[in-house]
Image: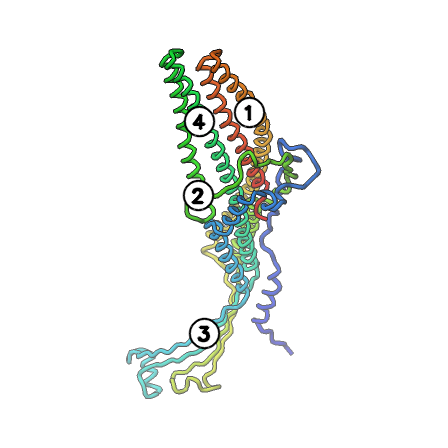
Amino acid sequence: MKRYINPYSVLILLAVFISACKVSKDVATPKPELPVAFRNSATTADSSSIADVQWKNFFTDATLQKLIDSAIARNYDMQIAIKNIEASQLLFKQVKWNYVPELNLNVTANTNRPSDNSVTGLSLTQYNIGTKHIEDYNANLGLTWEADIWGKIRNQSRSALAQYLQTNEAKKAIQTNLVAGVSQGYYNLLMLDAQLEIAQKNVKLNDSTLRIIRLQFDAGQVTQLAVQQAEAQQLSAAQLVPGFERDIAIQENAIKILTGALPDKVERTARLDEVTIPENLSAGVPSAIVSRRPDVKTAELALNVANANVGIAQANMYPSLTITANGGLNTFRASNWFTVPASLFGTVAGAITQPLLQHRQLKTQYKVALVDREKTVLQFRQSVLNAVGEVSDALVRIEKLKTQQTIIANRVSTLEKATNNANLLFSNGQATYLEVITAQSNVLQSELDLATVKNARLNAMSDLYRSLGGGWK
């Protein structure tokens, strides 16, 4: 006795058996070439890094903390990043439904009046059903399910998950840049405050010198040239004041915009010389950059997307198994539409589709996906290389700017003494007005340079914190 084998059962079993197959082989995340230690950083086994410190514990100035808090909460780039996360999360949840069969409800009603000379018209006349119209009323549920034989749906889910995680990393990257940007803007503001104060102080000092020279001119001790040069020196110091006031307003506006507010004044209580810079800023080990830096992590996740796209492109070249089923009510009279069980019908079908004419196109898409994956690997390596370079640059800036600050501070101290001596000697007639003007000009420029270098050190500290991946915790 022969046993009947249902062909649809064979198709389903075949789909289940092959569904475990994986047509593409993933490329593992490459191990980037990393140094034992960053350049300009001592070789150490200590993996601790300032990037592990929460930004509120790294930037301890209360005013700066309020500005950063406001930027994280109100900055529009940050809000857009959050919306991108929400959209990506919805898409990721939707992809999970690709495993579920598609189910549609169809309700149709139509009528057709065939030609009397057509086969259908002659048939209506032959069967004498009392009408020359063909009516059809249909209400059914249609089910379609594609078996995930080659892992196409699985790869779609992997791609959606990686893209969702990338949006999270993008938000972290924006926050990291915001923290660094606001802190650097705030330090620039303190520098400009200090430079404005220096310029105003020198204007007063030049006013005093100019009065003395004018008195000497009235007494016939100096010429008109001395008065003119003193006036020029006073104007040179005075013209710096509106320039610094302009830069302060522009910097305040930039900070306010970063915090999502309209341009306005930024309240501050600290002075540049009151801000301390930690002596030991630990960079940790270079290998930690891969897990800390959001942009590097995004590049790593891009490889997951590329692997999934290769799998999808390759799966498109293989046969697909689709199972369809329809069932419902059908009749040629509206009065009998919902007569059960007479109007019931049902169909089940299975189909295997193998692309033929478009195979070349699909193969090209697969090869392009392979090339894109190779590009993604290179981009990941490049992102790691850039990250290591940024950390090394920040470290060398911190080291050399510290030396510069020490030298300039000594120069300022020496020039302040020289200026005091020049004023005393000038008052006693033992120094010329040119020596006084030169000393005042030198100390002005040195004090401005000292404020600039102090600010550059603070900015380098913020940049090191950002380049190590700090600021998003």
Left or right, residue 332 beside residue 186? left
Closer to the eye: label 3 or 4: 4
Q: Secondary structure at mark 1?
A: helix
Disc 3 residue crowd, few under 14, some 14–19, many 20+, Cα 10 Å: few
Q: Which residue is mark 1?
A: 408
Q: Which residue is mark 4?
A: 204
Disc 2 residue crowd, few under 14, some 14–19, many 20+, Cα 10 Å: some
Q: Which residue is mark 3?
A: 105
**Among numbered discs 3 and 4, the one appearing first in the sequence:** 3
**Residue beneath the point at 47% across and 32% down:** 197
Query: In this view of the protein, which residue sits in the foreground, 445 or 339?
Result: 445
Q: Secondary structure at mark 4?
A: helix
Query: In this view of the protein, which residue sits in the foreground, 389 or 306?
Result: 389
Task: Work out how far the residue at label 1 is from the one at label 3, CA to CA, in angstroms.
Answer: 81 Å
**Among numbered discs 1 and 3, the one appearing first in the sequence:** 3
Q: What mark, if any, has residue 265 been given in the picture?
A: 2
**Among numbered discs 3 and 2, the one appearing first in the sequence:** 3
Picture coordinates of residue 155 (x, y %)?
56, 56
Total numbered labels: 4
Picture coordinates of residue 315 (x, y %)?
54, 56
Residue that protrudes farthest toward the left in the picture = 116
Disc 4 residue crowd, few under 14, some 14–19, many 20+, Cα 10 Å: some
Left or right, residue 286 beside residue 408? right
Left or right, residue 285 beside residue 327? right
